[in-house]
Structure formats: structure tokens, C-alpha cells
Image (cartoon, rainbow, N blue to C red):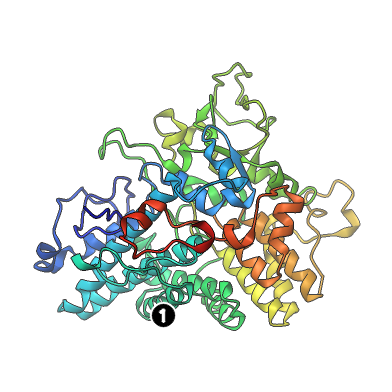
Amino acid sequence: MKFIKYIFITLTLVFMVGCSDEFLDKKPQAKLSDATFLEDESTIELAVDRLYGTLSWRFFRYGWMYFTTHEACAGDIKSGTQADYDWFKTFIHQNNHWYVELYWSRMYEYLNYCNVVIDITPKMAGRERAELAEAQAKFFRAYYHFDLANVFEEAVLRDHVPATDEYNIPKSSQEDLHQLIISDLKYAIKRLPSKSGWGASGNGRITKGAAMGLLAKVYLFRQDYTNARAYTDSVIQSSEYSLHTSYRDIFNPDQRYGVENMMPGHYMFNTTIWSGRWYNPYAQHQGCAGEFGNGGFYPSDELAQAYEEADPRFSATLFTATDKVEGFKSKKGAPQDGSVLLPTGVKYLNKKVIWPVTYWNNSEFSFQNVNPMFMRYADILLIYAEACNELGNTTEALAKLEMIRRRARGNKTFDQSVADGDNNGKGVLPEIIQTDQSLLRKLIWNERHIELALEGHRWFDLVRYEKVEPGYTTDLLVNEYGRTNFNYAKYHRFAIPATFVTSSQGVLKQHPEWQ
């Protein structure tokens, strides 16, 4: 029997196990086959809401899959209770690791949810309603295809719900994946409302700005800087988003729909759905083993060393042994004043997911309503800055870079005259004034590293940097980080999980370097 994990013909509407008080506050629904679904257009909103459910982080082990494919190889994390992360960090993983197998399976499940909507909407009578549903589905289809294109480079392209004779099809090139992604996003941009157009009742919905932001990122990865600049400029000029005033507070669970968050996660603690599955996998696999969370991985020394001296983002991102969690009582013998006893050999925790105990639902760290931001406005500004620098407009590049650094230093202007004194933040993070294109490029890349640390961007960035400056990533990983097993030709893309290659009856081919 064919092993076909990556396609699912049945549309399962048991989806939002973590719900918000906005549009996602739905009760679990029954299962509907495609045939039943086609008979009742009123279910289209439920099918669209299911797409948002893919960002809820309720799926067991999804935290492992995400950080494996987005962060582990980049050197910013190291293993805690899940030793497998170090296999990826040191590039000794094989072509059959189950974390990656689950990731592949899950991505194609999500794409099928998208295609169920997209295949149905052309047959609907109400065109405005149909196009809005299709626009959201095409955004998500573009998002997940882009993720696959970055993880595997070449992957199976899914642009419709497959027929039974299409279970095994060959992989497509990254170029073909990109062309579908670009087409989907252009469709979404024309038909999605802006953030203000959705209104408060649509908090968390995908917007025109999010679609433009993702398309800008696609063009950045293609080194099409003209289009990357144009689409980020459209987001900036819309004035729909802005930098939150406090870097630390961006990640506060109360800021899920804040001014900077362009694509929020949707986990919300809920004890009434899927009993026993209350954990937030994003938080669960972090924390501090033995104290709270399971400490699946921890921030690395390499990440800590990448910060400039006195960069306030260090203390907002990295929790150290001297930090305290308000309201926490140690389980390991530390003073009962919020102090945390870190495991042996661990220097840092991810502070972006650590909040006072008042945020811990049922007094459990792993029940927090913390969510990743899959896209935020700072990323848009940094894409704009990078594109401007590559196009020779250093003035614009530096202006956007300073916006990021000014916020980081507490919305203060740098003052060199007080840089060495008691300056209340005015002396930290000097304004970047470098105009040499090559040197400024590296400064912008470093700013991305620090500003977006532990948010799932770093590995994809390192892969593309090598294409812009051959040898850059290899030098960093091999010579600076000591990852001597790294070989860009092999490890810049993950192996297609061997299970799917084997079960495809010779149709799905493995990358040559991984055979």
C-alpha cells in the first residue's frame, strides 16, 4: 500500500484546539468530505479558519519540527533535553530523521487544507465572498510552499487537491515553487483587506500588508532587490504597522495583535478542547528543564557573543542565571525570590517566552499564551534597508537601520558625548554611518541576526547569504563556530525524508548529495 502522508483527501474541521476571543472562537465541528463540503457553501469560512489553525501551535511536537528546520543548523541554539538538536547543529544528521519527516508530512497536510478552499471557490456563486476566501488560502499556500522551498530547495508542488492517481509525483525546482508563490501572493494582494479594513473583529486575519511583506521576502531571497524594495515600501507607506515602543514588550502575550505583529500565531490556552493537549508546543519545548518547560533547547554561546556591548536586546532576549521570573518559586533549591536554577552547562534561556507567573495559565509555564510572530514590521524595515543598500541607496538603508536601533536603545538618539557615562541608554548602540556597500551589507545582516534572534529566520538567512557572498556562511560556521562537518553543497538544504522517497515507487527523487 502506498505511504501517502503528504496528502489528505478528507477535510477535517476539528481544528482550533487553541482559540482566541476573536474570529477563531469556534466550537469543534464534524468531519466533512469534499463532496459534502461542495454542497454547502456556508462552510467556506470554517475551511478558511482551519488555515489559521495551522498557526495555533497546538500540534504535538510542532515546536521540534519548526526549530529543527529553521534554527538548529544556524548555531543559535543547542540541545537541552532533546539531544537531536545537536545532530543538526553539528551537521551529522542523516536523511531519515523523524523531526524532518514530521515536518514534511505536516506541511503537505497544511497545503491540502489550502487547496480544498482554492479548488472550491471558483464554483461558488458569491464572488466577493469566494475571492476573499481564496485570497486567504492562496496566502497560506504561498507561505507553506515558501517554507518548503527554503527547507528543501526542491520539493513537491501542490497546487490542487490531488486525485488518487497523483499520490506520487516528482519534486519541482525552487524556481517553479517560487513562480507559484509569487502568483498566489499577487492574487492575495489584490483581494485582501488591509489591517484597518478588517477592523478589530478581524484581528489576526491575513492582510494585504502581510501578503506584500511575504512577497518582498520572496524577492529578497531571489536577489530581486528592486521588487523587494517596492513591496516593502508599499507596506511602509500604508502606515498600517509600526515598531512597538518597547523591544521586550513586543513578545508579551498581551501583544498578540500589536502594531508590529503582521502574522501572529493563534495559540490560546483552552481546557475544553482536546483534553490533555493543553500544552503550547512553542513554549513547552523551551523553558528550563527541571524548573519549568522541558528545556528542549537553549540559546547558544555563539548567539550571546554576537551582541554588541550593552545592546539592550541582549537582556530582552537572553535570560541569564542572575535574572528572575516574577512570582516563580524554584523547584531546584534556588532562593524563592524568582531565581531560576539553570541546568549544568546552560547559560541562557529564551527570554522572549519567559513572562511573570501571572501569565502562566493554571500556574504552568507551558500553558502560556505566548506565540511566535511569523512576520513583524521590523523584518519589513530590514528587508527594505538591505534592498536599498544593494541598489546603491545607502541613505535610505541607513535611515531604516537607525529606526531599528533607535527602538532598541529605548527610543533615544545616540549621543557619543555621553557614551561612556551614566547616559540612560543614550550611549549604547551607536548609529551606523557606514556607506561602503559591502561593509554595510554585513552590518544589516548582523542587525537581522540580533533583532530577529530565535524567531525562525536565521537558518534561511544564512543559506541565502552564501549566494550573495560566496564563502560567507561557510566561513562563519566552519571557522568561527567550529562546525567542521558543514559542507554548503550538501547541508544548505535538508534531505527529503527517506520514507517518502522510498514509498514513492521511484517517482520522488532524493537530492544527489543526500543519496
Residue 121 x %, y %: 21, 74
Residue holding disc 1: 186
Q: Is residue 14 left or right of residue 194?
A: left
Q: Is residue 148 left or right of residue 350?
A: left
**Can residue 289 be seen at all in this image of the molecule?**
yes
The residue under the point 16% across, 76% down is: 124
**Res 244 visible:** no
Q: Residue at 64% of width from left, 48% of height from top?
A: 75
> Looking at the picture, how far across and down is residue 396, in whole percent?
70, 77
Q: How many marks?
A: 1
Q: Position of residue 86 (x, y in %)?
A: 59, 41
**Which picture quadrant has residue 330?**
top right
Choose between 333 and 66: the one closer to the eye: 66
Q: Position of residue 57 (x, y in %)?
A: 39, 48
| Residue extending furthest toward the top | 333
> Dot 1 surroundings within 10 Å: few (below 14), some, or many (20 or more)?
some
Camera-side residue: 451 or 472? 472
Using the rendered view, name the quadrant where residue 410 is placed: bottom right
Would you identify the image quadrant in which residue 387 lies? bottom right
Q: Is residue 239 left or right of residue 273?
A: right
